[in-house]
Image (cartoon, rainbow, N blue to C red):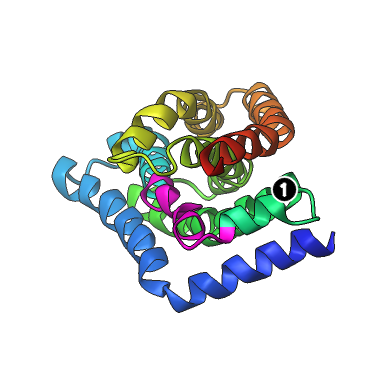
Amino acid sequence: MTAFLTAIRRDLLLVMRRKSETLTALFFFVVVTSLFPLAIGADPALLRKIAPGIIWVAALLSAILGLHKMFAADYADGTLEQMVLSPSPLFVLVGGKIVAHWLVAGLPLVLLAPLMALQFDVSAADLPVLLLSLLIGTPVLSLIGAIGAALTLGVRGGGALLSLLVLPLYIPVLIFGAGAVSAHSAGLAVSGHFSVLGALLALTLFCAPWATTAAIRIATE
């Protein structure tokens, strides 16, 4: 547990020294979600209908922006190799880095999303559903993204390759995350959507740290 918390604390401290990267992703999320109402017009019914998809797509793309940097700096300066040789289990350290990434790249999007939803005239009753869907879904984005970031370590043009790798895997999260809000807005049950999102979170929580660890070991050999 100490190694896990130390990994989180270390990455958060490093992010505090590079605030511009975090702010860039948040600015991108705000700009993208703000452009649609300007382009489509002020039709409240249409804005309410497309809001879940737009907010989820913007969150997904914002999460991808910083993914390639999750392990890149540690790989370049040799820190990742020291982690591999560390007596602490590598998957614990990797888990700490994934949690730190979500705290920096995912959680701010979750907190900003209800505010962005107001410009789409999303009802107050739908906001908790949107918030909960992002709260469950964004950790899945970080967990899947960690696998892609580890697989593309040291690869030229790795950022573009990473996007191609993880985007197809993000589709189920996007469908059920946005679908939960749309279903609630239409008066339908949302338990099925949240069950699938929860299953995806449980599956990636179990598999992603191990898969990421294996990819890092291959990259550092």
Magenta span covers which residues? 63-79
Residue furthest to the bottom: 17
Residue 77 part of the magenta-drawn span:
yes
Q: Which amino acid, by three-letter code, is at mark 1?
A: Leu
Give percent across and percent down for residue 52: 42, 37
Foreground of the two, 13 or 24: 13
Is residue 38 left or right of 202 when viewed as pictured?
left
Give percent across and percent down for residue 105: 49, 56
> Which residue is painted at 75% across and 50% down in the image?
92
Foreground of the two, 34 or 152: 152
Give the quarter of the figure containing the C terminus.
Answer: top right
Is residue 134 left or right of 2 when viewed as pictured?
left
Give percent across and percent down for residue 91: 72, 44
Is residue 39 left or right of 60 when viewed as pictured?
left
Res. 11 in view = yes
Give percent across and percent down for residue 160: 29, 37
The residue identified by callout 1 is 90
Residue 186 part of the magenta-drawn span:
no
Q: In the displayed structure, would residue 4 be above or below residue 155?
A: below
> Which residue is painted at 23% across and 45% down in the image?
36
Foreground of the two, 28 or 3: 3
> Which residue is painted at 58% across and 41% down in the image?
216
> Which residue is painted at 48% across and 32% down in the image?
178
